[in-house]
């Protein structure tokens, strides 16, 4: 099996021939590092598709190395939209900054009984493992490097729908700039999520909730011209 990996020291692909079949990409890279090239650098953790630390791009699509079955001719590169530290290892500080910008965590909550139906509404979003796959696939960063991002926004949707959360209004305010209105709703984030979360749909719902709270849609042009019964549109 031949596999090509983008190396950071020369920004070129290096091809390795490995006599392994029907193994995960992580197993294959471990073999390369221990048997062929100890300089190869990559990240991994749980090996169970839970921690999200082994996300890379394979043939132009985001994958978890511990889950993806390697194929002959695969090309592997680091996830996009972030700084490469070495080979397949990237700097995650930008991801952390966007989570802070969107207040994508439980900041304050109250003790109360939560029904099964209420928990079901946030169950899918709670499965986010912050693997950055949707962050890597998102094309918005090419135009707006300060975009909060699909990963953070889907977590915001999870917390503003948690009846125990007492600071939902602040979270909704935090995502009005460089947030929900900057998303193009292209859907590139949906198929790459290993947890089957649909950030695009969550962003749509956040837009609807924003409208109900009185936040204006900046993409709409309300600059005068039509008068309907005293209302100027």
Image (spheres, helix red, strand yellow):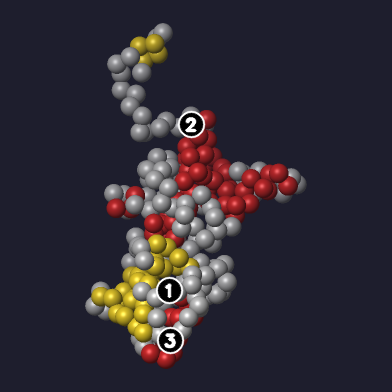
Badge 2 local density, few (<14 within 10 Å), some, or many (20+)?
A: few
Q: Distance of mark 3 from mark 2, alpha carbons?
A: 57 Å
Residues under numbered marks 3 and 2 in contact, where contact means CB atoms less than 8 Å apart: no
Is there any visible trace of residue 164 in the rendered image? no
Work out whether residue 99 or residue 58 is closer to the camera in this orientation and state it. Answer: 58
Question: Label 1 belongs to which residue?
Answer: 71
| Residue under the image location 60 percent in, 43 percent down | 161
Q: Tell me which residue sits at (52%, 70%) in the image.
A: 67
Q: Position of residue 93 (x, y in %)?
A: 41, 64
- Tell me where residue 55 sits by quadrant: bottom left
Disc 1 on helix, strand or loop? Answer: loop
Callout 1: 10 Å neighbours few (<14), some, many (20+)?
some
Residue 162, image x and y in percent? 63, 46
Q: Is residue 119 left or right of residue 100?
A: right
The picture places residue 69, in percent across and down from the top left corner, at 48, 72
- In three-dimensional space, the C-alpha distance between marks 2 and 1, rounded to whole angstroms, equals 47 Å
* Mark 2 or mark 1, earlier in chain: 1
Whether label 3 touches label 1, CB < 8 Å: no
Give the residue displayed 68% in from the left and 48% down from the top: 119
SS state under label 2: helix
- Decide which of tag 3 and tag 1 comes sooner along the chain: 3
**For marks 3 and 2 on the same chain, the one whose residue lies earlier in the sequence:** 3
Q: Which residue is mark 3?
A: 19
Which residue is more in the foreground, 152 or 108? 152
What residue sits 39% from the left and 67% below the top? 58
Q: Residues within 10 Å of mark 3 (few under 14, many from 20)?
A: few
Location of mark 2 (residue): 211
Would you identify the image quadrant in which residue 74 lies? bottom left
- The kind of secondary structure element at disc 3 is loop
Label 3, label 1: how far apart the Cα atoms are: 12 Å
The one of 112 and 66 positioned closer to us in this rendering: 66
């Amino acid at each position: 099996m031949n596999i090509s990996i983008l190396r950071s020291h020369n920004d070129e692909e290096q091809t390795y021939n490995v006599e392994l079949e029907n193994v995960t990409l992580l197993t294959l890279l471990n073999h390369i590092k221990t048997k062929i090239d100890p300089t190869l650098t990559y990240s991994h953790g749980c090996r169970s598709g839970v921690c999200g630390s082994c996300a890379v791009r394979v043939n132009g699509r985001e994958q978890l190395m511990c889950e993806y079955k390697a194929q002959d001719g695969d090309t592997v590169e680091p996830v996009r939209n972030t700084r490469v530290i070495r080979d397949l290892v990237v700097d995650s500080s930008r991801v952390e900054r966007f989570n802070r910008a969107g207040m994508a965590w439980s900041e304050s909550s109250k003790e109360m009984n939560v029904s099964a139906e209420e928990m079901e509404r946030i169950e899918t979003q709670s499965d986010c493992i912050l693997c950055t796959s949707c962050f890597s696939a998102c094309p918005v960063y090419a135009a707006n490097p300060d975009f909060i991002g699909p990963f953070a926004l889907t977590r915001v949707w999870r917390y503003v729908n948690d009846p125990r959360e007492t600071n939902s209004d602040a979270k909704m305010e935090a995502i009005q700039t460089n947030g929900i209105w900057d998303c193009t709703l292209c859907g590139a984030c949906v198929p790459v999520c290993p947890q089957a979360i649909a950030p695009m749909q969550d962003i749509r719902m956040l837009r609807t909730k924003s409208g109900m709270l009185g936040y204006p849609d900046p993409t709409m042009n309300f600059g005068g011209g039509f008068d309907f019964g005293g209302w100027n549109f």
